[in-house]
Image (cartoon, rainbow, N blue to C red):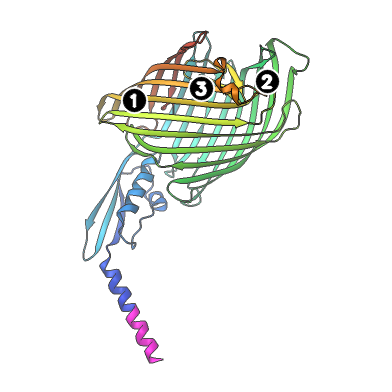
């Protein structure tokens, strides 16, 4: 019995001696924040008072903070206190986070559409996004969004979305085209889970009403002129994110996989599976350059339907191509651009960019050979400008002009808020 007590004392003394040799965080303080709550920063940080001082954990926390909408820049400082105790400061430069959003796009076919929105990206000082938009694309649409990725803990959050989207959409069949008024009214709930710094998951359900109403163009007895179908969409998203930010510059790799299963109550709009992956790669080039690339590969159920899910669109994949000029059941799209900072001082930066957008689509009911057919391949090089406010989240006003290099292609301007990708 006595020997056991002596052994316990020796182990305790050894543990205390070992702990005493390690550098320990005496206190962790947040400085420079105004709207972003210090308690929230503590909540999502891995470093904490009483823990071992580990520079890799501090670096990870800073990277996590720089990804927040509320943070323009962040860095840490370590000061010795006494013995092996240290004070750690997380210094934050905040963004202004009540942001209007503007997207305008047109082509030389005189098409014109816009989307106006207002979002708060740091509601309650908790990195909660809340806001909505109004869209005019021949018809009026609106949407309301709430996203709280750290609502319950550093790992677990929630997102709720509602939209009533109304647009004029072309429908392609028998080598002809007709125009339909398309409506998608949806309600969506997502659970957000981030087990660690580089990986996150989203799973949820979307209930929506999908309607097509014929407006003009070709007709076919087998193609209905009116459709109204209630659907359920089951969604799963996985993201790997190893990006690092320094103001307008980005470096690193990110991959986002999105899979959806859609049920249906109509054979005219049958149930289907759709999945795609976006691969993003960013590299700093010298002091003022940034090379950015995105590769999207996606496939859906290969039904021979005029209502195929992948679209060729100005504001989604090919700058200058027009507003939904084709559809397919598979897509391979590459966007690559070089961004160069022309002017950079204090709160403002001006970037110029040269880009190439290229893609190909699989025809509904077609095969993989469709990707190599010349009529399905589109290439749009172009030039653009970025006007960047470095103290307002996502305050990047972009102007791009893309022009098609294949026969019969369009050309046009694309305006928007934020980088294209």
- Pinpoint residue 40: horizontal percent, then vertical percent: 41, 49
Which residue matches tag 3? 359
Q: Quadrant of the N terminus?
A: bottom left
Question: Which residue is rendered at x = 75% and y = 13% of the image?
Answer: 220
User: What's the distance in space between the residues labelled 1 and 3, CA to CA?
Assistant: 21 Å
Label located before the other in sequence (1 or 2): 2
Mark 3 lies on a secondary structure that is: strand
Asked if residue 391 shows in the view, the reply is: no
Label 1 Cα neighbours within 10 Å, binned few <14 / some 14-19 / many ≥20: many
SS assignment at label 2? loop
Residue 415 vs residue 259, the one in the foreground: 259
Q: Nearer the viewer, mark 1 or mark 3?
A: 3
Q: Residue at x 35, y 29 (%)?
A: 291
Which residue range is magenta in the image? 1-11
- Write down the residue under mark 1: 339
Q: Residue at x 72, y 27 (%)?
A: 269
Q: Position of residue 107 (x, y in %)?
A: 49, 11
The residue pinned by badge 2 equals 306
Of pointers 1 and 3, the one earlier in the residue sequence:
1
Main secondary structure type of the part rendered in magenta: helix
Disc 1 secondary structure class: strand
Q: Residues within 10 Å of mark 3 (few under 14, many from 20)?
A: many
Coordinates of residue 100 in the picture (x, y in percent)? 44, 27
| Cα separation between marks 1 and 2 | 38 Å
**Residue 10 belongs to magenta span:** yes
């Amino acid at each position: 019995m006595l020997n056991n007590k002596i052994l316990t004392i020796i182990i305790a003394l050894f543990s205390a001696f070992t702990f005493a040799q390690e550098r320990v965080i005496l206190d962790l303080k947040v400085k420079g924040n105004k709207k972003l709550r210090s308690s929230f920063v503590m909540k999502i940080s891995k470093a904490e008072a009483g823990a071992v001082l580990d520079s890799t954990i501090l670096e990870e926390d800073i990277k996590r903070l720089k990804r927040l909408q509320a943070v323009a820049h962040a860095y840490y400082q370590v000061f010795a206190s006494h013995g092996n105790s240290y004070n750690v400061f997380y210094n934050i430069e905040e963004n202004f986070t009540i942001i209007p959003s503007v997207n305008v796009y047109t082509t030389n076919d005189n098409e014109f559409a816009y989307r106006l929105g207002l979002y708060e990206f740091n509601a309650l000082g908790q990195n909660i996004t809340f806001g909505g938009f109004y869209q005019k694309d021949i018809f009026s649409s609106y949407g309301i969004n709430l996203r709280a990725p750290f609502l319950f803990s550093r790992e677990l959050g929630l997102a709720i979305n509602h939209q009533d989207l109304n647009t004029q959409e072309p429908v392609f069949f028998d080598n002809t085209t007709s125009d339909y008024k398309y409506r998608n009214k949806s309600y969506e709930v997502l659970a957000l889970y981030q087990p660690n710094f580089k990986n996150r998951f989203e799973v949820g359900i979307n209930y929506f009403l999908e309607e097509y109403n014929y407006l003009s163009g070709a007709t076919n007895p087998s193609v209905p002129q009116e459709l109204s179908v209630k659907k359920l969409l089951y969604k799963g998203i996985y993201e790997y994110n190893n990006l690092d930010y320094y103001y307008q510059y980005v470096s690193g790799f990110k991959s986002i996989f999105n899979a959806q299963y859609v049920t249906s109550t109509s054979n005219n709009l049958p149930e289907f599976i759709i999945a795609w992956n976006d691969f993003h790669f960013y590299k700093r080039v010298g002091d003022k350059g940034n090379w950015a690339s995105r590769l999207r590969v996606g496939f859906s159920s290969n039904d021979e339907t005029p209502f195929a899910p992948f679209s060729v669109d100005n504001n989604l994949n090919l700058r200058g191509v027009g507003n939904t000029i084709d559809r397919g059941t598979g897509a391979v799209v590459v966007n690559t651009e070089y961004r160069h900072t022309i002017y950079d001082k204090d709160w403002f930066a001006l970037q110029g960019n040269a880009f190439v957008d290229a893609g190909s689509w699989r025809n509904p009911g077609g095969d993989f050979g469709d990707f190599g057919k010349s009529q399905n391949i589109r290439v749009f090089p172009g030039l653009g400008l970025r006007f960047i406010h470095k103290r307002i989240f996502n305050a990047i006003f972009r102007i791009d002009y893309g022009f098609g290099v294949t026969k019969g292609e369009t050309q046009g301007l694309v305006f928007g808020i934020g980088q294209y990708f």
